[in-house]
Amino acid sequence: MEGVGDDAASPVAPLAKWRNDFARAFQYYLDRSTPHPVQRWLGTLLVAAIYVLRVFYVQGFYVVSYGLGIYILNLLIGFLSPKVDPELDVLEGASLPTKGSDEFRPFIRRLPEFKFWYAITKAFCIAFFMTFFSLFDVPVFWPILLCYWIVLFVLTMKRQIMHMIKYKYIPFSIGKQRYSGKRSSASSSGVSRD
């Protein structure tokens, strides 16, 4: 019965330990980046610029870029959409507040900002990795793909904006609303009382 509990001797154990250590370190740095959205997005812009330069340099991989664009458009729709669809709420009787007397409910996204950032960054890294394999370099006439993507973007954004207008929500918070106390009529008219 020797070797039953002896995991240290198996060749898989060091690999599993390394994978676990790597996953733990990766999660640690990911957690530390959470409160720094500006730096995260600047890093993503850098990764995107490197990808664009790579595609420009090799003059290919337009299908990969098109797929990346479609994926980012899909993520953007999730980012701009509310977690609970108002169309379904209207059928059930509940809806977003439309009058000042209605209860305030904050906008909750279907795809939170952090997950949106993480998915876009991961997509650019995967697309960059794919540019090193000629299997993904399908010869296409790229202006047609670009025109089709622009048409798809415009139609999708039009539909999303119409949805926002119809259900009166804005997917961005402008900041906390500040209230000032009531002013007395004497102080607002500039007349001083002695």
Image: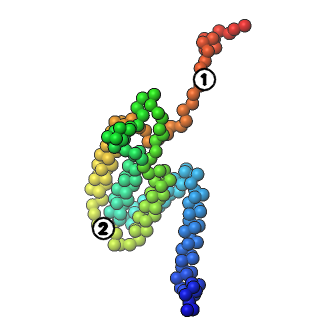
Residue at 69% across, 8% down: 193
Picture coordinates of residue 37, whole percent (x, y)? 55, 51
Percent coordinates x, y for residue 66 in the rendering: 34, 59
**Vertical arrangement, residue 101 with respect to residue 73, above or below:** above
Q: Is residue 154 visible?
A: no
Amino acid of disc 2: Val
> Horizontal and vertical percent for residue 55?
40, 63
Give the farthest residue toward the bottom.
Answer: 1
Q: Which numbered circle lies on residue 181?
A: 1
Q: Which residue is mark 2?
A: 138
| Residue at (46, 62) in percent of width and height | 122
- In this picture the colour scheme is rainbow
Query: Which residue type does callout 1 highlight?
Result: Gly
Give the residue at the far front of this rendering.
1
Q: Nearer the viewer, residue 148 or 116?
A: 116
In the figure, 177 relative to 63: above or below? above
Secondary structure of the residue carrying tag 2 is loop
Disc 2 versus disc 1: nearer the observer: 1
State the CA–CA distance, disc 2 to disc 1: 65 Å
**SS under mark 1:** loop
Bin the neighbour count of mark 1 within 10 Å (Cα to Cα): few under 14, some 14-19, many 20 and up: few
